[in-house]
Image (cartoon, rainbow, N blue to C red):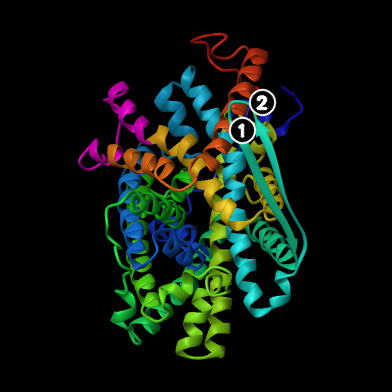
């Protein structure tokens, strides 16, 4: 370890800068809702309708809300019991043993986060630039587009597509602006999150009001023949729809990544989690019904038209005209940026926590000497997300969801049961309701999304490759630093990768 490292010297002297518990229930819930209500629901409505071929796709959002609540109870118990920065990193290490298997699993979580966190941030930036193209169509002009295929032995073919447009520059610019705004003290960020939250809620409220005051029941219930026939196509379409709904709901756990900065975490973390899920689920369902009552689902899901990309803009255009379409487009762009802001804030703290624990690059543990936030992890995350802005949005969403489910959510949902068995006397300010049913239901739902959908193996291959590479990197690092499994039971060294 470098003895001249100021962070190391401060820690060894017991004077390391501490994060500020400056967020109450209101700020925590607002950040969660900002994370959840990004550009996702505004651009995924046509995708989810196409997946099931009609308004019955609303089942995807309803079931997605149910699984989000079940998984939210997993996060609530773990977050209240271990209220520190890092979220899943901290939980997985403690569940499976900090000096044994938990060391590997927590490392794999950080490893996959190196891909999934920037992908999540990039999806918001790409969606923002997509709506910007409604106002400035020239942003869609493609300068470069390319698809690469690579065959991996025993895994299969991996395919990656990227594109360069003026819209790509807008996406990258949004990413860099979020970094700039987050480069400050957490108490100031909490106030800014409330301002962003007001605009987001105002946008959703306007959409709901416009739809309900122009409600057309015939369009909402315009089901195609055999819409609810329990065929193989129905169940595979439901799996694809639930994958998209899962992406739309994700973010309810964001407060767990900021555990060191939440007031009274044993009470406020579970409340923020469950409040944000319930509120956003109600908003999504009412908003989508409102849009379906104005814009025919066949128009939204039609391939090769702009109706899918600018569905909310067309919705307002049909009701109020061009001025409303332009205004709501700007508000959706604001909403997308608010989500990017919240995502980048939360994930930068995860990298910080892992580095502070010696299980990631130690430079990520550096805290700003004046404003006291992990500035290196923030800057790194922003740079990688900017690179991912060159990928296609549909590929980003699918890869993000599958990678995260396989390498984080499944092992965590099972892990909450493992922790109850291993440490029954552990203080738990919040206990999962109807334990262990929610954890089991969440696990079943994640398995369904992974395997019961069209072309399911495409993204699973990405996750398998990331998993294999992560294990190899961990083993090489563990051998060099004499950590588990090469020194079973020994405390992990406080070095870095």
Q: Nearer the viewer, residue 190 or 461?
A: 461
Q: Where is residue 461 in the image (x, y as percent from the top left)?
A: 56, 36
Question: Outermost residue, left direction?
Answer: 434
Tag 1 residue: 355
The C terminus is located in which quarter?
top right
Instruction: Please count the marks in the image.
Output: 2
Question: Outermost residue, right direction?
Answer: 143
Question: Outermost residue, top direction?
Answer: 487
- For mark 2, give the secondary structure: loop
Q: Give the range drawn in magenta.
A: 413-439
- For mark 1, give the secondary structure: helix
Circle 1 packing at 10 Å, graded few (<14), some (14-19), many (20+), is: many
Q: Distance between the residues labelled 1 and 2?
A: 7 Å
Q: Do the residues labelled 1 and 2 touch (CB within 8 Å)?
A: yes
The N terminus is located in which quarter?
top right
User: What's the residue at 51%, 86% (across, down)?
Assistant: 317
Q: Is residue 336 something one can see in this rendering?
A: yes
**Which label number is shown at residue 496?**
2
Q: Where is residue 117 in the image (x, y as percent from the top left)?
A: 58, 46
Q: Position of residue 2 (x, y in %)?
A: 75, 24
Circle 2 packing at 10 Å, graded few (<14), some (14-19), many (20+), is: some
* Residue 327 versus residue 96 in the image, above or below: below
- The reply, left or right, for residue 172 in relation to residue 424 is right
Q: Is residue 353 something one can see in this rendering?
A: no
N-terminal-most mark, 1 or 2: 1
Q: Where is residue 105 in the image (x, y as percent from the top left)?
A: 50, 27
Question: Outermost residue, front direction?
Answer: 225
Q: Does the magenta stretch include residue 126?
A: no
């Amino acid at each position: 370890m470098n003895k001249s490292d100021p962070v190391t010297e401060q820690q060894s002297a017991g004077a390391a800068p501490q994060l500020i518990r400056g967020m109450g229930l209101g700020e925590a819930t607002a950040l969660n809702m900002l994370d959840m209500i990004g550009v996702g629901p505004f651009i995924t409505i046509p995708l989810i309708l196409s997946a099931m071929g009609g308004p019955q796709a609303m089942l995807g959002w309803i079931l997605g809300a149910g699984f989000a609540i079940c998984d939210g109870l997993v996060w609530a118990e773990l977050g209240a019991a271990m209220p520190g920065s890092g979220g899943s990193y901290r939980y997985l290490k403690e569940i499976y043993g900090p000096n044994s298997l938990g060391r590997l699993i927590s490392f794999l979580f950080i490893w996959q986060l190196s891909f999934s966190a920037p992908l999540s941030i990039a999806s918001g930036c790409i969606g923002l630039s997509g709506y910007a193209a409604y106002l400035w169509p020239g942003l869609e002009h493609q300068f470069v587009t390319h698809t690469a295929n690579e065959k991996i032995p025993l895994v299969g073919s991996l395919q990656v597509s990227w594109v360069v447009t003026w819209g790509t520059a807008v996406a990258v610019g949004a990413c860099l602006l979020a970094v700039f705004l987050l480069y400050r003290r957490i108490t100031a960020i909490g106030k800014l999150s409330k301002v962003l939250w007001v605009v987001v809620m105002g946008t959703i409220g306007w959409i709901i009001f416009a739809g309900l005051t122009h409600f057309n029941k015939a369009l909402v219930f315009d089901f195609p023949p055999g819409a609810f026939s329990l065929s193989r196509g129905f169940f595979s379409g439901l799996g694809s729809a639930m994958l998209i709904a899962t992406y739309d709901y994700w973010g309810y756990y964001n407060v767990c990544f900021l555990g060191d900065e939440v007031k009274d975490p044993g009470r406020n973390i579970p409340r923020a989690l469950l409040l944000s899920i319930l509120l956003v689920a109600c908003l999504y369902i009412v908003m989508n019904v409102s849009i379906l009552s104005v814009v025919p689902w066949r128009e939204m899901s039609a391939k090769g038209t702009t109706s899918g990309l600018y569905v909310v803009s067309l919705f307002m255009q049909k009701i109020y005209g061009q001025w409303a379409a332009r205004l709501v487009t700007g508000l959706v762009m604001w909403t997308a940026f608010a989500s990017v802001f919240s995502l980048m804030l939360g994930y930068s703290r995860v990298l910080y926590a892992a580095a502070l624990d010696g299980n990631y690059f130690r430079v990520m543990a550096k805290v700003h000497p004046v404003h006291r936030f992990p500035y290196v992890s923030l800057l790194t995350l922003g740079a990688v997300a900017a690179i991912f802005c060159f990928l296609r949005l549909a590929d980003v969403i699918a890869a993000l969801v599958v990678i995260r489910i396989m390498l984080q959510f499944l092992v965590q949902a099972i892990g909450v049961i493992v922790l109850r068995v291993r440490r029954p006397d552990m203080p738990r300010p919040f206990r999962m309701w109807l334990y262990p049913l929610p954890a089991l239901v969440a696990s079943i739902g994640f398995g369904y999304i992974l395997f019961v959908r069209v072309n399911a193996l495409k993204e699973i291959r990405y996750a398998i490759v990331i998993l294999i590479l992560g294990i190899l990197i961990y083993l090489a690092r563990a051998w060099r630093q004499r950590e588990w499994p090469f020194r079973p039971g020994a405390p992990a060294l406080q070095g870095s990768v």
